[in-house]
Amino acid sequence: MSQTALATSTSAPAATAPGNTGGSAGGTAFTVLLSLSFCHLLNDMIQSLVPALYPILKANYALDFGQIGLITLAFQFTASLLQPLVGLVTDRRPMPYSLPVGMASTLVGLLVLSQASSYPVILMAAALIGIGSSVFHPESSRVARLASGGRFGLAQSLFQMGGNFGQAIGPLLAAFVVAPRGQGSVAWFSAAALLGMVVLFRVGGWYARNRQTAMPRGRRAGSGATVELPRKRVTFAIAVLVMLLFSKNVYTASLSSYYTFYLINRFGLSVQSAQVLLFVYLGAVVIGGLAGGAVGDKIGRLPVIWFSILGALPFTLALPYVGLVPTVVLTVVIGLIMSSSFSAILVYAQELLPGKVGLVAGLFFGLSFGLGGLGAAALGELADSIGIDAVYRLCSFLPFLGLLTALLPNVEGRAAPAWVTRLRRRG
């Protein structure tokens, strides 16, 4: 990212801060947002090499599904444990240059993974990559909100789009670069981490110059939140959001971690063919994630949350019982629908807890990793016991938890649909 480009974004600091635009779109700093999205792409592309390497690691080290799940747990639990803490600390004391530090941890983990010769070292490498995520995501999310110009959902979606796309291309890189050349070729991707560190250093400079315009505690005009809630109601709403994330992330963990094995075991595909179809699914996740935030800015977060979880139910129920082509089609539809929820959930939670952008981002990114990691580990053990096909039949019922959205308060001041009002009264 050039100095000229950053200067364009910072020429009017008051315009780039959400608190000073009153929610107007004119001050959106797209150069900063796209830079963050690009770094998110690099970060998550590197991280996605871990699950994309599972078939190779399984064959090289004679691992079972339970051990594969523990690798996911080592990465995602580390990220889950540290992200809320990082967010809480940086809410009190912003650290603009922590962004390249997070990418550096990912770089070290990547290099260790490329040279790992035993299962414990693989776990350590996965944990280092998780630490990188724990530092990168909360502060990046804060900078995205600062650069949003009031378009909070769009900003988070653009940021998330990079991560989703990085996760999508990781399996392709593993299939066509790492698989033919072996585990050591993972080190080649250290160049991507170094590039990310350079860009994030420049973004950190923009953030350091503009952080005084960050939103203070309390709700601001244009935030979209017009309803103040008591602490118990907020706590209950956060608990509901956690359950919705559980539904979404455990199901998506079943696809991101075990979809290739499912395709290989059920349809006899090669590893490379299965990785390509995993890329197709993850590509749908990219599109759905971008759409969810933009739509949420226009119609509200709650309708998006409703649709993104409960709306996937018919397709998840059908998935375990169809052939190869319908399986590919259904996973694309599921990816489009389910991925639309995260930006809406994150922005909704930030409105519930104004002034705690880093804590909320760390908590919900951390929960996404943690729930996905726990889900992957549990599903791996279950797959060893009852088979991968049976796991997908059980997971197909998870979107039923989308009904819990009826319990969420309307903090945006928008009229709830009539059927939702009736459902709440019956509850």
Image: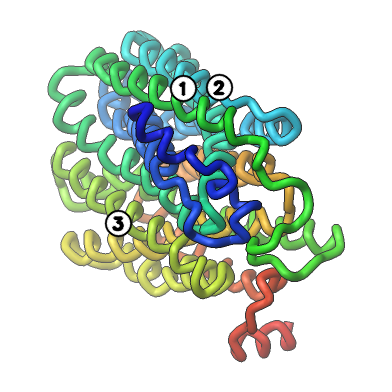
**2 or 3: tag closer to the N-terminus:** 2
Residue 201: image tag:
1
Residue 309 in the image, given as x and y percentages of width and height: 49, 66
Q: Which type of secondary structure does the marked residue at label 2 adopt?
A: loop
Crowding around mark 1 (Cα neighbors within 10 Å: few <14, some 14 to 19, many 20+) is: some
The residue labelled by disc 3 is 284
Q: Is residue 271 left or right of residue 230?
A: left
Q: Label 3 vs label 1: CA separation?
A: 31 Å
Q: Amino acid at mark 2?
A: Tyr
In the picture, the quarter occupied by the C terminus is bottom right
**2 or 1: tag closer to the N-terminus:** 2
Is residue 64 positioned above or below 124 on the image? below
Q: Label 2 vs label 1: CA separation?
A: 6 Å
In the picture, the quarter occupied by the N terminus is top left
The reply to whether callout 2 and callout 3 are in contact (CB within 8 Å) is no
Q: Residue at x 77, y 48 (%)?
A: 217
Q: Residue at x 56, y 67 (%)?
A: 301
Question: Viewer-proximal residue, 102 or 222?
Answer: 222
Is residue 341 positioned above or below 119 on the image? below
**3 or 1: tag closer to the N-terminus:** 1
The reply to whether callout 2 and callout 1 are in contact (CB within 8 Å) is yes
Q: Residue at x 20, y 44 (%)?
A: 274
Q: Nearer the viewer, mark 3 or mark 1?
A: 1
Taking the image as drawn, is residue 315 in sight? yes
Is residue 87 positioned above or below 158 on the image? above
Is residue 350 positioned above or below 97 on the image? below
The residue labelled by disc 2 is 97
Residue 253 in the image, given as x and y percentages of width and height: 44, 47
